[in-house]
Image (spheres, rainbow, N blue to C red):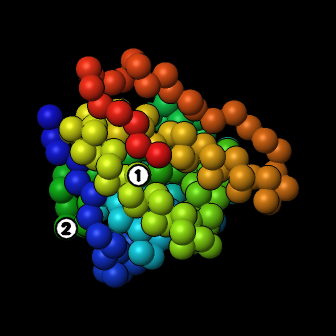
Amino acid sequence: MDRIVVVDADPEWPKQFQEIAAHLSPFLADSIVRIEHVGSTSVLGLAPKPIIDIDVVVADEEQVPIVLGLIESAGYRWVGDLTVKGREAFEPEDAQHLPDHHLYLVVENNRAHVDHWLLRDALIDDPELIERCAAIKRDNAVLADGDGELYVALKAAFVADVLTKARRDHGLAPVEYWQPELVEFLRPSPRRCD
C-alpha cells in the first residue's frame, strides 16, 4: 500500500494552483465560468495531503460535454465521477510539468461545487476548525496505513458536520451526507479519530 502523506501547509500552493490554471486556461477559453482552487491546499495553515484540488466551473449542464472534451485536449483523461454525482474527475495523461493535482469539472453551484466551496470557506473562516481538521487528517493518515478509502471514511463524519453547519449558516437546504459504517473499512484494531 502507498503511504498517505499529510504535510505542513506550504505557502507555494496558491502559486502551484495558478500554474495549473495557467496551463488549462488557453484550452478552456470562454467556455467556463472560472477555475477555482478548492480542497485543503486552498486553506492557508491547514496540513493536508500535498495535492492541489481544482474545480473547472461551467455555467450549466449543457457545457459539461463540451468542456469535458476541452479538458481532454489539455492532456487529461476523463475518469468519471468517482462516486460523486455532479463532479467529473480527470487524471493527467502523463506526469506533465505540473504539480500533483486533482482536477474536477462541476456546474456552478451544483451540489458537488457547493460542497467544495462551502468546506473550503468554512475552514478559512475558523482557525480552530483548521487545527481540528489538521489533527484529524494526521491521525487518520496513520490509522489508514495507506488505505485511501479508509482515510476518506475516517474523516467523513467531520466533513459532514462542517458541511451541515455551513449549509445552515448560508440558508441552504439540508442534505444527507455520507456516513460510512466504519466496521466495513476497519482492520482489527484501528480506532476512529475525532
Question: In this orientation, does residue 75 appear?
Answer: no
Q: Position of residue 155 (x, y in %)?
A: 45, 43
| Tag 2 residue | 97
* Residue 103, numbered circle: none
* Residue 136, numbered circle: 1
Which residue shows up at 21% across the image and 38% down it? 145
Say what secondary structure mark 1 lies in.
helix
Q: Position of residue 78 (x, y in %)?
A: 39, 41
Say what secondary structure mark 2 lies in.
loop
Q: Position of residue 43 (x, y in %)?
A: 47, 70
User: Would you place residue 67 above or below residue 97 in this image?
Assistant: above
Q: Is residue 154 left or right of residue 108?
A: left
Q: Position of residue 30 (x, y in %)?
A: 59, 68
Amino acid type, mark 2? His
Residue toward you, 94 or 157: 157
Which residue shows up at 35% across the image and 60% down it? 48
